[in-house]
Image (cartoon, rainbow, N blue to C red):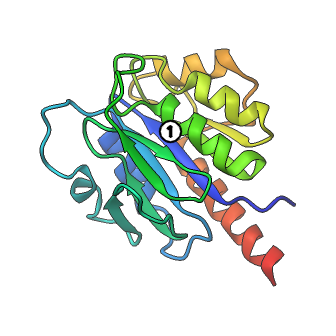
Amino acid sequence: MKKYEAVVIGVSAGGLVALKSLLSMLPNNLSFPIIIVQHLYYNIKDDFSDLLKGGSLLKIKQADDKEKINSGCVYIAPSNYHLLIEDDKTFSLSIDEMVNFARPSIDVLFESASDAYGACLIGIILTGANNDGSMGLKKIKDRGGLAVVQDPNTAEYSSMPLAAISATEVDHILPLEDIARLIIRLSCNNTKLQS
């Protein structure tokens, strides 16, 4: 069994409903952090993490620049910033050019997370209407990480899951309920490996 150190999730159109559903199924004692990029309109001023807190047992917060990443916490990329993970497992925020017409970009998060966590990373692509995240998920898979995609037949928008499936050989194509079960199982495996 492999010990996983972090989960990154990319989501776009239909994301609020998908994320609320997924996060509501997870316990509050996960052995790794979950880091999420949800495509947001640049003029959104509200903290998207506040929209996800209802119904979840997890600590959910907006990621801050230079913040240390902690297990059991869900971090959300702030609007109009790329979210990156540094080698020392802290966040950095960037206002570099948009990637795939998005800032934050899923690919930017996934690629920097792959550099920081290597084979100990789980990458998940959920509903969305573009192809952002497909190259980042490919990098995660190429580095030995786990690649998971929401079943396009269950996604509100199937374009992003289909693009990810086309870009790399994914390990799991699952509906949200089974993605939650997989996250829980891998978190439990980490706990067993530590004891």
Mark 1 Cα-neighbour bin, 10 Å: few <14, some 14–19, many ≥20: many
In the foreground, 130 or 103:
103
| Image quadrant where residue 144 sits | top right
| Image quadrant where residue 38 sits | top left
Q: Residue at x 73, y 76 (%)?
A: 191
Percent x, y for residue 124?
57, 40
186 in relation to 126, above or below: below
In the foreground, 63 or 9:
63
| Image quadrant where residue 134 sits | top right
Callout 1 amino acid? Leu
Q: Looking at the image, can residue 154 be seen?
A: no
Percent x, y for residue 59?
38, 70
5 in relation to 86, above or below: below
Check disc 1 and report its element: helix, strand or loop. helix
In the foreground, 134 or 69:
69
Q: Looking at the image, can residue 49 be seen?
A: yes
In this view, which residue lies farthest toward the right?
A: 1
The quadrant of the image that shows the N terminus is bottom right
In the foreground, 91 or 7:
91
Circle 1 residue: 109
28 in relation to 148, above or below: below
The quadrant of the image that shows the C terminus is bottom right
Percent x, y for residue 98?
35, 21
Q: Residue at x 51, y 56 (%)?
A: 34
